Image (tube, grey):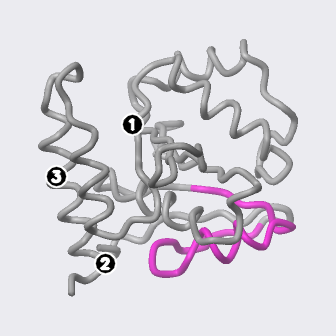
Amino acid sequence: MLTEAEVWAEYRKCENVLDDFDPAQQNYWMKIALAKVLQFPLIPVKIDNLDQSFNMLNIRNKTGKSFSNTTEPISIKSHVEWWEKNKDTMIAYCFVSEDLIKLVGYSAIYLKDGKYWSTCAILPEFAGHGYGRFILHFIINQIEGDVWATARKDNPAACTKLHIPSDWEMWKDDGTLLHFHTWKGRK
């Protein structure tokens, strides 16, 4: 039986090989088969362009009340501006169910003020199954360095179930938000 760290390492190796294929020839079924073999509950689908990023916007606007910064719906114009500003430094994925029918959530990391910041969301109908922790763990393991995040204190799931001590360290409590960063000892 592989440890969690070994599973993630194997997944990244396979994903890197698959990502080297020409997109027109890339066999996404290989990723799906690998995810099933490794018993991942969701299939990650990389977001590479503005059209794909609208899935993030739709999920974000359905879950915005729980976000730490902007809780109001985001306009298409604001999303396009955000995408254009961050697309070259961002790594983003949508996650779909194993049957490839249901969009479940997204996660992304992007560069802001010299630091990588995370964002993630799970559609309400999929909440409570650990998917948020899964997709956040997935995205922070896409880079070597630290990742930063905030969570509203009145959102206990974001504070305790997403930002778990094996991945995150809480470094500041400003009364409204908890501030986290990944700790360098994570594997």
**Residue 152 in magenta stretch:** yes
Q: Are marks 2 and 1 in contact (CB under 8 Å)?
A: no
**Percent coordinates x, y for residue 39 in the rendering:** 35, 70
Secondary structure beneath label 2: helix
Residue position for label 1: 46
122 relative position to 17: left or right = right
34 relative position to 176: left or right = left
Amino acid under disc 1: Lys
What residue occupies the far top of the structure in this picture? 77
93 relative position to 160: left or right = left
Name the residue rendered at 79%, 64% in the picture. 174
Cα separation, mark 2 vs mark 1, equals 22 Å
Amino acid under disc 3: Cys
75 is higher (above) or lower (below) than 39: above
Cα separation, mark 1 vs mark 3, equals 14 Å
**Percent coordinates x, y for residue 139 in the rendering:** 43, 53
Front-most of residues 26 and 65: 26
Q: Quadrant of residue 54?
A: top right
Q: Quadrant of residue 88?
A: top left
Secondary structure beneath label 1: strand
Pointer 2 or 1: first along the chain: 2
**Percent coordinates x, y for residue 82 in the rendering:** 61, 22
**Percent coordinates x, y for residue 154 in the rendering:** 87, 67
Q: Which residues are magenta?
A: 149-173
Pointer 2 or 3: first along the chain: 2
